[in-house]
Image (tube, rainbow, N blue to C red):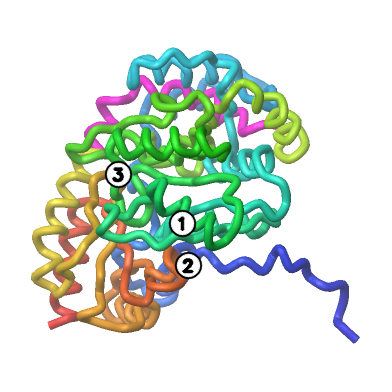
Amino acid sequence: MADGPEISKRSGVAPFIAMDVMRDATALESAGGRRVMHLEVGQPSTPAPRLVREAAARALDGDRLGYTDALGLLSLRQRIARHYGERHDLDIVPERVVVTAGSSGGFILAFLACFDAGARVAIAEPGYPAYRNILLALGLTPVGIPVGPETRWSLTPELIDEAERRHGRIAGVLEASPANPTGTMLTPTALAALATSCHAQGRWFISDEIYHGIVFGAETVTALASSADAIVVNSFSKYYCMTGWRLGWLVVPERLVRPLERLAQNLFIAPSSVAQAAGAAAFDATDELDANVARYAANRALLLDELPKAGFDSFAPADGAFYLYADVRKLTNDSTEFCHRMLHEAGVAATPGLDFDPERGQHTIRMSFAGSTADMEEAVARLKDWLS
């Protein structure tokens, strides 16, 4: 007889390996007093901007911080809508904005509102592992489509149509630009082609734009410029340096607002009140935030120049975000074991590619350059010594 009631099958998703690596790296530091270079998790090393922290302090002092509307504070929704006019010259009404508990909460809400159980949703491989695992936990069917240099590591209408012929009806497509783990961005033409193709085929198109603002010479466009039916997911975590505040947003077609509101009321009640009260200030902190992006750019240039000297010489185009996705087949056929040794022998934490690509990830690793430039320099020096 079993020890107790059975655990649900939906809980049997794969671990988020980057978080496992962070846990192991933190434990290694705690146990031996050894300092680890953290290149494993995509998290800015700087705090939230000063204006955000000041707004939070005012809220803590003067607000009881009760529940907000399930869709979020109207003032924050209005500020997010105004952002699309300022950044993209688009007229987005605040009623289309849904404030969420980070982008993760946004994905859960969007998937539940758009897809019935069993529906197939196309995602790129390599790609952010939580896409696949959230879909599975919700009883949906992720359809991983291998991508590579031939499409600049991005989905295309042709790849999606071919996947539908092989697997059956594709109900939706999820694409990120800039992407995690590659950092690669869709051109405006490629993004428009995906959005318009999905509209023509009656598929939902979900555009993950959480790394907007962190780009290196490329043009940032939003799917909202191409399709009124597109669902955009964004977050205060990356560009705005508010990972632990757990605040994000969706921009959705008007017909989805009430379904999302009903789901949000029941699943989350409301996003964090103090995070919402502070979040609007982030849009006025661009000087501080762009200085962070300048540091990321310097880190990126440093790693692209120095890592080949350590033996890493093949990367996906890192147009944005703060990652390098490296092909390490010249160094190993087992990226998991390689990253384990790198952590314990060199004191450098990175994420094995199997987190992002279950089929081909044994040949790749992801390194985050969101930390300080001094840490990037130290990480490169350690890797050169280790691999020499």
Q: CA distance from mark 2 to mark 3?
A: 24 Å
Decide if residue 310 is in sight here: yes
Q: CA distance from mark 2 to mark 1?
A: 30 Å
Q: Main secondary structure of the magenta part?
A: helix
Residue 287 sits inside the magenta stretch: yes
The mark lying in front, picked from 3 and 1, is: 1
Instruction: Give the structural element (helix, strand or loop) at label 1.
Output: helix
Q: Is residue 80 above or below residue 264?
A: above
Amino acid residing under circle 2: Ile
Q: In terms of image quadrants, where is residue 360?
A: bottom left
Q: Nearer the viewer, residue 66 or 266?
A: 266
What segment is highlighted magenta in the picture?
Answer: 270-292
* Residues at marks 2 and 1 touching, judged by CB atoms closer than 8 Å: no
Instruction: Give the structural element (helix, strand or loop) at label 2.
Output: helix
Which numbered dot is residue 162? 1
Q: Is residue 347 above or below residue 214?
A: below
Looking at the image, tell me whether mark 3 or mark 1 is earlier in sequence order. 1
* Residues at marks 2 and 3 touching, judged by CB atoms closer than 8 Å: no
Q: How dense is the environment of label 3, judged by Cα within 10 Å: few (below 14), some, or many (20 and up)?
A: many
Seen at 36% across and 37% down, the residue is: 191
Seen at 48% across and 63% down, the residue is: 19
Looking at the image, tell me whether mark 2 or mark 1 is earlier in sequence order. 2
The mark lying in front, picked from 2 and 1, is: 1
Looking at the image, tell me whether mark 2 or mark 3 is earlier in sequence order. 2
Instruction: Give the structural element (helix, strand or loop) at label 3.
Output: loop
Decide if residue 47 is in sight here: no
Q: Which residue is mark 3?
A: 185
Amino acid residing under circle 1: Glu
Q: Which residue is mark 2?
A: 17
